[in-house]
Amino acid sequence: MSESEILESDRLGHFPHPRQVARLSGQGEAEKALFDAFMSGRMQHAWLLTGPKGIGKATLAYRMARFALHYGTADAARAAGAHDLSVPEGSPVFHQVAAGSHPNLLTVRRPWDDKAKKLKTVITVDEVRRIGHFFGLTATERGAWRVVIIDSADEMNVSAANALLKALEEPPANGLFLVLSHQPGRLLPTIRSRCRTLRMKPLEEQEIEDLMAAAGLPQADRKRKAAGPAGEERRQIAQLAEGSAGRALSLAESGGLDLYKDVAALLAALPRLDVAAVHALADKAGRKGADSDYEVMIELITFWLQRLIRAGAGLDAGQDIVPGEGAAMARLAGPGSLDRWVEVWEKIVQSTARGEALNTDRKLVILNAFATLEAAASERAGA
């Protein structure tokens, strides 16, 4: 593994890093808000880009950074006929940002732990303190922008959050903070109050299907359990992705649709569970080195449960991906069950987070999730 790969905590698999992506889909309103603010000459010094994971927040942040670093002023951008945040892909700024080497751009993210030989689980205070050194060392030509991207603020520990707050309270001239957050409600209220919030929306399913098609996913030569055409698989993956392009690409690349079908087929039989099949899935996703499979497994279990909860609340749970799963959800989500299923969802989410914090055997975490679902379904059957 190369040094650059080790440090890329915000890269999705082998896909291009957001700083290397020239185009942004489905976020025209959010891009226009940034563009209009810059062109007005009254650009706020700090922006909080919010929304679910994988919808393009980082891609938009790097587009804004490139635009500010390339043009510098609204007059220069206007003279060049700029109408959005794109810059020429052949420009020096584009190449420097893509390579992570632009001197006036700093990205703050989870660092590599040399001792543990893995990425740290949080953004530490030392990483955030780099901002002060960055602003002190990049005082170049008069009026030049200096941009800091925090990806993501949700991953800061308490000390790091306080250090960021201090930096936001003392912004330098032409300093621009682009703070990304998937769950802004968890941030310090004082951090939120010092940023202009830009709420970004999940993508439409058709937009996600188009992105997957452009990426050549799912691959035609992959041995898929699903016998249907790639277009049908893209539709199903887009449904699973819930508006997140990043999640869709990850599912398509990792065979997440096949895994979901295995999970959904097991859960549709509740309160009966095929114990051997559950253990086989837990062995596969819980094995050492299978971080991606484990994360996808937990996401898919909670996704199925969220659909069940929506069914119990009388809301649209979406089309069946596995035949009969909608009927199974309707059966399990009978009258008076909603609170119990919400409790189950919370328990699984909390136990998963606790398992990661305590480094619990991942197979055991998966088995406990299925056991929790089985117990709740058995209660319903006996009600």
Image (tube, rainbow, N blue to C red):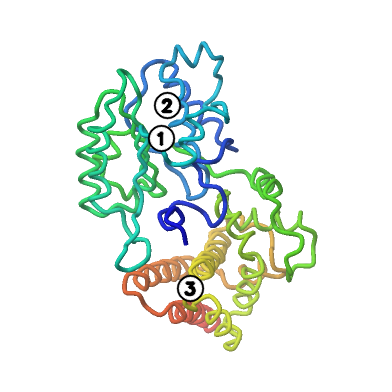
311 versus 340 height, above or below? above
Residue placed under numbered mark 3 in the picture? 289
Task: Answer with mark 3 or mark 1, whichever residue precedes in sequence.
Answer: 1
Between the C-alphas of marks 3 and 1, the distance is 34 Å
* Residue 193 horizontal/vertical position (percent): 28, 35
Relative horizontal placement of residue 205, taking residue 295 as reference (left or right): right
Mark 1 falls on what kind of element?
loop
Task: Answer with mark 1 or mark 2, whichever residue precedes in sequence.
Answer: 2
Residue placed under numbered mark 2 in the picture? 69
Instruction: Determine contact: label 3, label 1, CB under 8 Å.
Output: no
Instruction: Determine contact: label 1, label 2, CB under 8 Å.
Output: yes
Residue placed under numbered mark 1 in the picture? 102
Amino acid type of disc 3? Gly
* Residue 277 horizontal/vertical position (percent): 61, 84
Identified at 37% across, 61% down, the residue is 119
Mark 3 falls on what kind of element?
loop
Q: Residues within 10 Å of mark 1 (few under 14, many from 20)?
A: some
